[in-house]
Amino acid sequence: MEDPQVNEDTKASDIAAFENEEDPDIRHKIWLEKIYQGDHVPQLTVRAIIMGGLLGMLMSISNLYTTLKLGWAFGVALTACVLSYCIWNSMRVLMPKLTQMSILENACMQSTASAAGYSTGSTIGMAFGAYLLITGVHVDGWIVFWWTIATACLGVFIAVPLKRQLINREFLAFPDGIACATTLRSLYSHSKEAVQKAWSLVITMVAGAIAGFLSKGDFAWQITMHLKLPEMIPFSSMLIRGADLAKMPGFGFEPGLLMIGAGMIIGMRVCASMFLGSVLLYFFFAPTIISMHETASEGTILRWAVWTGTSILVANGLAAFALQWKTIARAFQTAGSVKAGESETNAKNDQIEVPIKWLIIGLIPSSILMVVLEVIAFNISVPLGILTVVMSFVLALVACRATGETNITPIGAMGKITQLTYAFLAPSNITTNLMAASVTANAAVASADLLTDLKSGYLLGANPRKQFWAQFIGVFFGTIAIVPAWFAMVPNKEVLENYYHPPSTMMWKAMAEALSVITQGADQLSKVIPPSAQMGILIGAFIGIALAIADMYAPKSIKKFLPSAMGLGLSWVMVFANSFGFFVGALLGLIWTKLRQKNADVYLIPVASGAIAGESLMCAIIAIIKASQAISLKL
């Protein structure tokens, strides 16, 4: 049997004609006749599902660590595609009788891995982590397991009616989906550059694992580096006003490739804003407050700073969301036009597209399970539980369109809109506020993730029904991995708070606490949020809204010099070492790009992705081992 190649079935001229056609009906006709390969090229195979499931399980643990440590989750689809290609071809060297995976098998593998590695853990570290910080106890494991299944499945089924409109008819970009399709085409055309790119990811993944092993493990050759910046900067004693900066939590530079790789991907504007905000906090605001208030300590200052950082991010996210009113309007037009789009498809198209009835078949049990869990685990009333499902559908519409148009899934805005809603529907109920947001945010992420993978498959000529099943199966792979990993990595509140310093988790906690007392008056609010922090919230909100307006309306020549609200907000929530690491990575990426533009265009993203995946996975394993050892010593 010959190895299936993309060029055997799909000519470059057909691909160009398909992608350049503006009329949606003609474009989709070209797709059915020239691009679609799902009837004669292997796609939903056992080996593709197993490969995607196993890679997704590993990447889910990796993303859980990055979410806790950095407040960021990274898409796994591209990494999974490259790793799958390299692993399978390495296996073929050892077992020559193995045939090469088809390009559509890799597309299905990508869907399984993406669902397992990204869609299942979006809010475990944030919502359940915030619950742990607030209450001091974990939610029962079986609740976390079925909660993760239910929210991810809600998102997957909600995406069903959106695919035909957003991908087939409107042909929205979904840039990550395009990147995966382009990478797979290059790999299957045996492009030398693509193969080198793939192996560069694998090599840096190994390097990242080694870096994580050396910097986090309890070994004789462990690297420890804490830069005493006050001793290195002239006149620093005047800058820090006598405060012992070395005692500030997280002050220094943490060696490793994780944050450097993340900085290379995120870019200079965000990372420079992080570094600037962190310098302002550690060198000016914190020492000033300590010198003014004898009772203030370095640790309490950082907890105070969380309110200001969260305010910047929340205000900016909601303002940017409101300013995208055209996108929101188009999202609801999408909901009304799905049926019209279906009537224009032919019989063959109806046989390969995911039927709309699957939405109903899947949503009914998923919704019932979700509401039952909300009632049993968190005493959320049935009407409010049903409302979370309704809001999940509405917000997923917006999230999917935003992802398709901008490649940014506004998970923060989705959660915060729900929290604001429930602050008035269930006042003073911090648990309801927090967990309702978990439902809508995770469902929105799962919907957008599925459509990104379906976009990749559409460009490659995959069968969307088979991709849907791959995505659905991936949810279970990811949940099986991430739930035990969560409890193993975070055995208690102290580990979460002191070992990870989790920025996103702290923001979810701060938002839930503030909204739980917002309707009770100024006296109750002051008990939760100190008056000085309330002033920081107001200033942060002003900064966030102003930057959102500037991002929308400022000329491009000016916009690139404006600070990033994301960077400024995170810098006051995460420790200095993380901001510094991000900045170093962005600086290295900028230098690389300036010196060797073409080389950086090819290798920067796979090199950075490999570093992130390798080190985060190794650090997660070490965190699990350390937690197990600590528990054993107590016993």
Image (cartoon, rainbow, N blue to C red):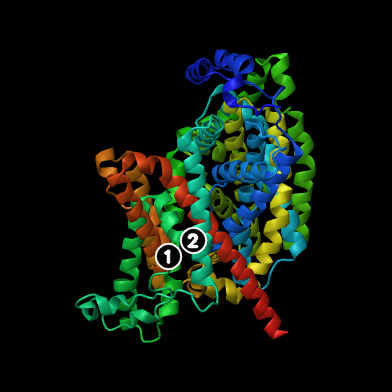
From the viewer's side, name the closer residue of 577 and 369: 577
Q: Position of residue 618 (x, y in %)?
A: 57, 63
Instruction: Tell whether 83 sits left or right of 224.
Output: right
Report if residue 373 is visible in the image. yes
Task: Name the residue at the bottom extreme.
Answer: 294
Instruction: Identify the residue under disc 1.
Output: 578
* Image: 254 above or below 127: below
Earlier along the polypeptide chain: callout 2 or callout 1?
2
From the viewer's side, name the closer residue of 381 and 67: 67
Task: Name the residue at the left extreme.
Answer: 235
From the viewer's side, name the closer residue of 82 and 405: 82
- Point out the image quarter for the N terminus: top right
Instruction: Tell whether 580 sits left or right of 494.
Output: left
Three-letter code, disc 2: Leu
Tag 1: Cα neighbours inside 10 Å, few (<14), some, or many (≥20)?
many
Mark identifier at residue 506: none
Instruction: Tell whether 80 sits left or right of 467.
Output: left
Instruction: Identify the residue under disc 2.
Output: 70
Three-letter code, disc 1: Asn
Report if residue 240 is visible in the image. no
Q: Residue at x 64, y 49 (%)?
A: 55
The picture quadrant where one finds residue 65 is: bottom right
* Image: 492 above or below 405: below
